[in-house]
Structures are given as C-alpha cells and as structure tokens.
Image: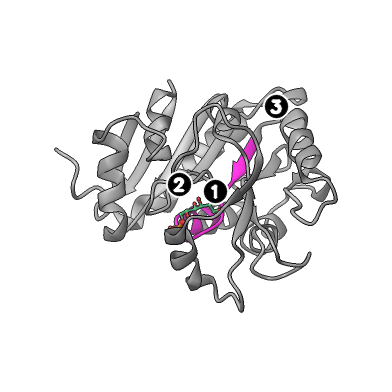
Amino acid sequence: MNIVVVSPEKFGNTAADIVQRVTENTEAPNITFPTGDSPLPLYRELVNRYQHGKLSLANVQAFGLDEWGELEPGHPIRCISRMKTQLYSETDIPVEQIYYLEPNTDDLDVHCEAYDKRIADMGGLTLSILGIGINGHIGFNEPGSKATVRTRKIQLADRTLNVSQKYGFDKTPSWGVTLGLATLLESKEILILATGAHKAEIVHLTVNGPETSDVPSSLMRRHPNCTLLLDEAAAQLLKK
Ligand code: F6R
C-alpha cells in the first residue's frame, strides 16, 4: 500500500490528480465512485477543473460502488442521486456511461451478477475509488466479507447503521447492495480516501493490523497498486 499524507487543503487536489492521470492515459477508463464525506473534496475539485476547462470526464465509464436497499428510485439519499448531484450532473460524463446498482430489482442476484459481468466484459475496473467505514467496510463489504466475494446484497452492520444516521433517513435501511471485494481487487488501480481524526483508529488497523476479513480494508493491502490517501488527522496513529 502506497500511503500518502497531505493537509486537508491539498486532499482534493491530490486525489483529483490521480483521477485525471487515469482519465488522460486511458481510452475509456472504468471507474467506481463512492459516496460519503471522504470523496467530497475530490468531487469538488473535479467539478472545479471541469468548469475551468482543465479536465474532461467524457470518456469515463462510471460505476456506482454501492446502494442502500429499501429506498424508492429517485430518493435523494440514494447513492446514485447523490453521485448525480455531487459529480455526474456537474461534469461531462455522458448519462449512457453511468451504471449503478438497483436494489429494487425482481431478481437481485441476477442483477448483481450482470453488474460484475458488465465490468468484466468492459475489461475490468481501471480505478476503484473507495472510502473506509469506521468498522473497515469497503463499499458495503462489511466485516466478515472475504476477498473472494462478488457483487451482492448484504445486511448492514450496526456500526454502519449508526454512522449512516448522518444522512437523515426517516427509517435507516437494514441492507444494501455492494460491488464485491473480488471485483475491486481485480481493479488495475485502487485509491482509498480517508479524512478526519475519527478515521485514525481504522486507518491504523488497515495499515498495521492483521490482514483479515474482520477488517475488510486490510485486505486491500494485497493489491499491488493501491494508494491510501489520508489527511494528517486520519494518519495520526501511523508511525512516521
Ligand atoms: C459509500 C461507501 C462507504 C463509505 C464509507 C466511508 O458509497 O461505499 O463504504 O465510503 O462508509 O464513509 P465516509 O466517507 O462518509 O466516512
């Protein structure tokens, strides 16, 4: 794992440089986009670069990383709704190049399998952008998820449900759908984002703890081209 620590002011720029390098060096990059707080500085910077004519995302094939169950299509808390507001609608990613998981599907297993197959048929993921949950979840691959799991429905962990109160659910969904760790680990490159002192403990475990499915983020260490981008607060428990 390549660990990069920057100030909060440089966080968005550093992440955007990585995304821009991938988009400029790849004909049609397949990129996963997470929601949550961690990628917001990145999305703000990508939008800023696009608005100033410094960046185009027109060649990007955008894949949603995960989605809440139990919310109707178009619900503003849905990951796809937030991705549209925070990035997709603010840049030039063509709508027909935006893919996402739809939990309200008759046969969810078939839908998840088709999502993985689409990614495989398109040559696999070029860049997986990820956050880390305070319990080490990656996407919604909660503790206990093995490195071999594929895209699927999953029960959300209690800690995830507690933290997700920040989104203002009327009733918090008990399950979600997530890209699997195996699909993410097959990505050519991985960029994990973590900011803030509340992430310091899980960042420490991710980097220095045992590589275990109890902490799914620790499994990303086995990837040969994985960058963990941290601000100083999130990095405070790491050895110099
Ligand atoms: C969101 C997702 C989650 C978050 C994680 C960190 O699509 O996949 O794994 O990345 O819960 O969330 P924040 O960034 O809000 O701390």
Are the residues at dot 3 and dot 1 in contact (C-beta closer than 8 Å)? no
Q: Amino acid at mark 1?
A: Phe
- Residue 53, position in %: x, y? 63, 50
Residue at numbered disc 2: 137
Point 37% across, 54% down: residue: 134
- Along the horizontal axis of the image, is 206 left or right of 87? left
Are the residues at dot 2 and dot 1 in contact (C-beta closer than 8 Å)? yes
Of badges 3 and 1, nearer the viewer stands 1
Beta carbon at label 2 within 8 Å of ligand 1: yes
Residue 56 visible, this orientation: no
User: Residue 27 shows which numbered tag?
Assistant: 3
- Where 74 sits versus 221, above or below? below
Q: Which residues are magenta?
A: 31-43
Q: Amino acid at mark 2?
A: His
Mark toward the start of the polypeptide (3 vs 1): 3
Q: The residue tagged with tag 2: helix, strand or loop?
A: loop
